[in-house]
Every structure is written in C-alpha cells, then in structure tokens.
Image (cartoon, rainbow, N blue to C red):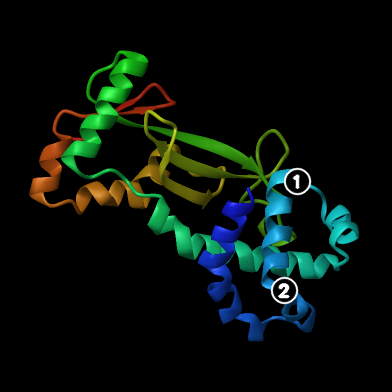
Amino acid sequence: MRFTFKWLCYEIISLLRRDSNNLGSDIIRLVWEQKISISLWFLTIRESFKSIDKRFKIGKLTISYVLRDFFDVIIEKFLVEKIRFSNTELKIKRITNGFKKLKRISNVINTINDNYILIKTSHLFLVDYFNRKYYYLIILQVVVNHKKKFLDICIDWSNFIHNSRILVNSSFYNKFNNQNNLAMTFFNNKYILSNKDIQILVG
C-alpha cells in the first residue's frame, strides 16, 4: 500500500500543482500528499465530509475542492492511458479464449453493462436525473473482458436515455467505426455480450 501511494504521488503531483493558483488559499496550504490522502480516504472509507473534516482538520468546502481537483487529474492522467480497448490479434485471442474457458461461449471479446449510480443533484437538474422510483441517478456504461478488467467507460447520461443511444454515442462504439481494415479483420465473427440478453455482432 505504501509503495502504491508513493507511485500515485509521483504520477500526479505535478498535475495537481499545475492549477493550484486558481484555488483558494486553504487548498494551496495543503501538501500534495495530504490532498491525495484525503481523496483516497474518501473513495475507500466513504466517510461523510463532516467526518473527513474532523479527521483531517480541514473545512468541507476545502474537501470539495480537493476531491474535484483529484478526480480531474485522475481522469486526465489515467482514463486514456490505463483504460484501453484491446485491438490487436494477440490480445483479442487471449480474451476469446478466456471467455470460452469461463463461460464456454466461443468468439466473445467483451461484455457490456449499464449500471445505475445514485447521486445528489442540484435543483437545476432535478427532472433530468429523476428516476421513477423517486431517486436521482446517472448511467454508467462499462465494457469489461473475461478478467473483469475495465476496457471502456461512458458516464453522465440521465435515466431517460435509452441504452442503445448511450452505446451509439459512446467512444466505444466510435472505435469500431474508426478502425482501419486491418484491425477490423481481428473482430470478424466476434460478439459482445450485453446484460440485456442482446448479442452485439462486431464484425
């Protein structure tokens, strides 16, 4: 854990520093390791801002700025770098073999699923994210391989958007449309399994 924390600090501290002049004085006074610690604590322990305030001796508004800064940096640094769709013949073969061993289904390259995430929303967006069960949510579309590793994500859609529209407007869908002819040959007769009992034919 200590090694992972040091590695994360090394990877993102320079990015956290970059926009520090635009933040309040309380944010600037925090050491970079402390900003990362607060963010990781919030993600893993899921304490309220009030509890984090008492633990780290900082205000709730400061916590909000710290988390927003941290999440922006994580998305910018790792979203494209770490979450990548497999597009080589060797990688695709490994995945299809993995699914065949796991589920006894041939030619499956990924599974796609839509998950509902509960949120607190501003009064300005009450209608957009309101669910028929009387709570607010956004939809997260995820694509995973046989090892449950994330290969693509699409988020921030409201409850009223159909799953098919989310798929068509996602970067995952566009990746196939933008593949060159050589890359597309790797996807011939391959399938993506959906949680809606739909098999999406790729090539």
Residue annotated with mark 1? 46
**Residue at the limit of the structure toward the bottom, as seen here:** 21
Say what secondary structure mark 2 lies in. Answer: loop
The quarter of the image holding the C terminus is: top left
**Residue at the limit of the structure toward the front, as seen here:** 3
Q: What residue lies at 35% left-to-right and 49% top-to-bottom?
A: 84
Q: Quadrant of residue 32?
A: bottom right
Compared with 179, 35 (above or below) is below
Residue annotated with mark 2? 31
Q: What residue lies at 87% left-to-right and 61% top-to-bottom?
A: 53
Give the crowd class for mark 2: few <14, some 14-19, many >=20 residues within 10 Å.
Answer: few
- Amino acid type of the residue tagged 1 in the rendering: Arg
**Residue at the limit of the structure toward the right, as seen here:** 54
Using residue 85 as the reference point, say whether residue 125 is left or right of it.
Answer: right
Compared with 60, 198 (above or below) is above
Using residue 171 as the reference point, say whether residue 10 is left or right of it.
Answer: right
